Image (spheres, grey):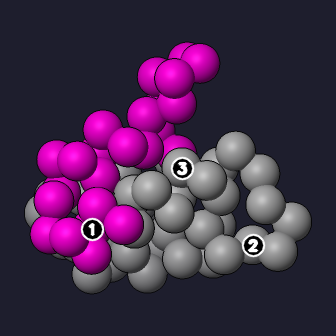
Amino acid sequence: MSAYQYLRDKDPKMARQTMAPVAYDPHATRSAELARKMIERIDANDLQGALEAGKSKKDEQPAGS
């Protein structure tokens, strides 16, 4: 299951666990940046903000899906 789906299912713990390998990949990409933003929002207990942060501005596809 994708991190985005975990957020939609209101399961922030699993969403964070799913995003962590992407967010902290030493070969950072745009996906890593989006994942870190999502984790910041999850840690702030802002699930809606995490969902919004995960959308790519280019194509509006969620990161980690």
Is residue 63 highlighted in magenta? Answer: yes
Give percent across and percent down for residue 36.
51, 63
Quarter holding residue 43: bottom left
Q: Give me the residue at 45% from left, 56% from top.
A: 37
- Residue 10, compared with residue 8, is above or below; it is below
Location of mark 2 (residue): 25
Give the image location of residue 18, x and y in percent.
Answer: 47, 73
Q: Earlier in the sequence, mark 2 or mark 1?
A: 2
Q: Quadrant of the N terminus?
A: bottom left
Q: Write down the quadrant of residue 17 in the picture.
A: bottom left
Q: Residues within 10 Å of mark 3 (few under 14, many from 20)?
A: many
Q: Splitting the image into 4 quarters, where does residue 13 fall? A: bottom left
Residue 31 showing in the rendered view: yes
Q: Position of residue 60 (x, y in %)?
A: 46, 22
Amino acid beneath label 1: Ile
Query: Does residue 8 show up?
Result: no
Asked if residue 3 is among those painted magenta in the image, a careful observer would answer no
Q: Magenta segment range?
A: 40-64
Left or right placement of residue 13 versus residue 40 in this view: left
**Which is nearer the N-term, disc 3 or disc 1?**
3
Q: Nearer the viewer, residue 11 or 38?
A: 38
* Mark 2: few/some/many CA within 10 Å (<14, 14-19, 20+): few
Residue depicted at x 29% and y 45%: 51
Residue 35 in the figure: left or right of residue 33: left
* Helix, strand or loop for disc 3: helix
Q: Secondary structure at mark 1?
A: helix
Q: Amino acid at mark 2?
A: Asp
Please name the residue that numbered disc 3 is placed on: 34
Q: Find disc 1 in the rendering and name its residue.
A: 42
Cα gap from disc 2 to disc 1, whole angstroms? 18 Å
Residue at 59%, 18% in the rendered image:
58
